Image (tube, grey):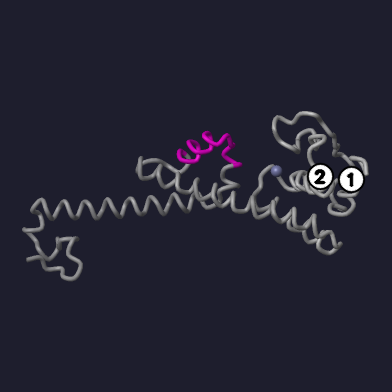
Amino acid sequence: MTFTERVEFVRSTFFPRWDRKRRWQFAEVDDLDGSQGRCDREVKTIRILAGMATGDELLALVIHEIGHAASNDYHGGRWLRTMEAAAEIADAKGLAAIASLLRQQISGYRDGFRMTAAMIYGEVENCVVGAPQITFPQVVDFLRRGYGMSQDQFLRRFRRAERVFEKAQQEARESADAKAKWTAYHAGVGRLSKERFACPCAKESNVVQ
Ligand SMILES: [Zn+2]
C-alpha cells in the first residue's frame, strides 16, 4: 500500500464523517523537528515523517494525527474520546493490532495528562500560599505564560483551576485565622476573657487553666 492508499484506508475506515469536503491534505516529509507526525490545523495539513513508522504503526500514527484534526491540538479529553472511538472501530473490524496500538497511546496520554493537571493544580496552590493576596486572573496569567498557552487554552484545559484556587484561598484564610487566634491568646488577650478566647491549641475543653 502506498502512503496515499493508507491515508485513504484510515479516512474511510475510522473517520468516514470527517472532512467530507476534502479540505485536509496529507504529506510525507523528511524532517519534522524530531516528531513523527504533525497536525497543522491552520493550513489543514497533516505531515508524517517518511520512512519511520510502517504497517500498523503508520496507520496508528495517521489515526493519531487525524484525531487532532477532528478534535484539538491537545491530548486531553476530546482527543482521547476520538481515539477511543477509533479503537472501538478497530475492535469491530477485527484490526486487533491497531486497536492495541491506539489503546497504548490512550493510556500513555491519559496518565500524562493527569500528571500535568495535578502539577498545574499544585502550582495554583503554591501561588496562593506564596502570595495570599493574589487574584485568580493573576495566577492564570502567571502559569499560562510559563506553559506557553493563551488564557482561553489554559482555562479550557485546566477546568478545575478556579475551584482549586478558591479552596487554597479558603485554607489560607482559615490557617491565618487560627494563627491570629493563637497569637491573640498567647499574647495575653485570652487571660482577660477566658471563655471567649479559648486557646485554639486545646482540643477538648474551652476552658483554659
Ligand atoms: Zn498528538
Q: Residue at x 14, y 60 (%)?
A: 197
Disc 2, SS = helix
Q: Quadrant of the N terminus?
A: top right
Mark 2 within 8 Å of ligand 1, using the beta carbon: no
Q: How many marks?
A: 2
Residue 119 marker: none
Mark 1 within 8 Å of ligand 1, using the beta carbon: no
Disc 1, SS = helix
- Which of 176 and 106 lies nearest the eye of the viewer? 106
Residue contact at pointers 2 and 1, CB within 8 angstroms: yes
What is the distance, in whole Å, between disc 2 and disc 1 at their CAs? 8 Å
Q: Residue at x 79, y 47 (%)?
A: 57
Reading the image, the residue beneath label 1 is: 6
Q: Residue at x 74, y 45 (%)?
A: 68
Amino acid type at mark 2: Leu
Principal secondary structure, stretch drawn in magenta: helix
Amino acid type at mark 1: Arg
Q: Is residue 186 magenta?
A: no
- Which of 203 and 55 lies nearest the eye of the viewer? 55
Q: Dot 2: within a 10 Å radius of its alpha carbon, few (fewer than 14), some, or many (20 or more) residues?
A: many
Reading the image, the residue beneath label 2 is: 58
Q: Would you identify the image quadrant in which residue 83 lies?
A: bottom right
Which comes sooner in the sequence, label 2 or label 1?
1
Magenta segment boundaries in residue numbering? 138-153
Name the spot of residue 142 as percent of width and height, x first: 48, 36
Q: Is residue 142 magenta?
A: yes
